[in-house]
Each structure stands twice: as C-alpha cells, then as structure tokens.
Image (spheres, helix red, strand yellow):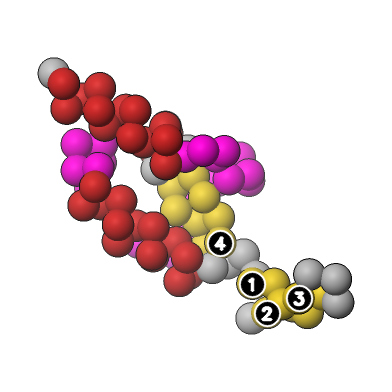
Amino acid sequence: MRKQNKKTGAKKKITHALLCGDYGQIFGSEKQCMKYYAVWKDIFPLLFESASIVNKYPIIEYESTFDLVNILMKKHDDLDKK
C-alpha cells in the first residue's frame, strides 16, 4: 500500500475519492476519505441529501479541490442563514 521515496519517506497510494457533488472532491487512501466523510456528514448536514459508497464512479476531474473544506463551510453557512 505504501511506496518508499528516499527524499520524502513513505507515501500512501491514492485508492479512493470523496466526491462532494458540485462542491469538489478529495483523493487519498480509504482511511483518509472515510475520516473526512465521518466528520463532514455531521458538520455539513444541509449540503448533502444522501451518501453512498460505490466501487466505480465516472470521475471527470482527477485533482483534489483546493480548499474544499472552506468551500463547504461557506455553502453550508449560506444555507443555514436562510
């Protein structure tokens, strides 16, 4: 599961994605993605109607969304004010 790099040490393989609809996505290990999901589902209940774990999903953009948590906070705050 890990690759060794002499300069930077062990690296985790990217094996999973946490897709947050139109807001963006992050990529990482299963453990990383599940950690974020476990926290964000409770912190941002107004943003996501449902969640599902799938083995295959068509991904168009293969880069993590920069500053995704701040995007989610802003969108959730906007909905919370309504």
* Discs 3, 1 touching: Cβ within 8 Å: no
Q: Which residues are magenta?
A: 44-68
Task: Check if mark 1's residue and mark 2's residue have beta carbons within 8 Å.
Answer: yes
Considering the image in quadrants, where does the C terminus appear? top left
Q: Is any atom of residue 38 visible in this view?
A: yes
Looking at marks 4 and 1 on the same chain, the residue that comes earlier in the sequence is marked by: 1
* Alpha-carbon span between mark 4 and mark 1: 8 Å
Mark 1 / mark 2, whichever is N-terminal: 2
Residue type at mark 3? Gly
Residue named by callout 2: 2
Q: Quadrant of residue 80?
A: top left
Looking at the image, the residue that sits furthest to the left is: 82
Give how far apart the Cα atoms at labels 3 and 1 are.
Answer: 10 Å
Q: CA distance from mark 2 to mark 3?
A: 10 Å
**CB-based contact (under 8 Å), mark 2 and mark 3:** no
The amino acid type found where label 1 is placed reads: Lys
> Which residue is rendered at x = 30% and y = 61% of the image?
38
The residue singled out by tag 1 in the image is 12
Disc 4 crowd, CA 10 A, few/some/many (<14, 14-19, 20+): some
Q: Earlier in the sequence, mark 3 or mark 4?
A: 3
Q: Give, as a three-letter code, the residue at label 2.
A: Arg
Q: Gap in Å between the C-alphas at discs 1 and 2?
A: 5 Å
Q: Position of residue 69 (x, y in %)?
A: 42, 41
Which residue is pictured at 16% across the width and 21% down the height? 81
Label 2 packing within 10 angstroms: few (<14), some (14-19), many (20+): few
* Picture coordinates of residue 74, whole percent (x, y): 34, 28
From the image, state whether disc 3 or disc 1 is nearer to you.
Answer: 3
Q: Secondary structure at mark 1?
A: strand
* Element assignment for label 2: strand
Q: Which residue is mark 4?
A: 28
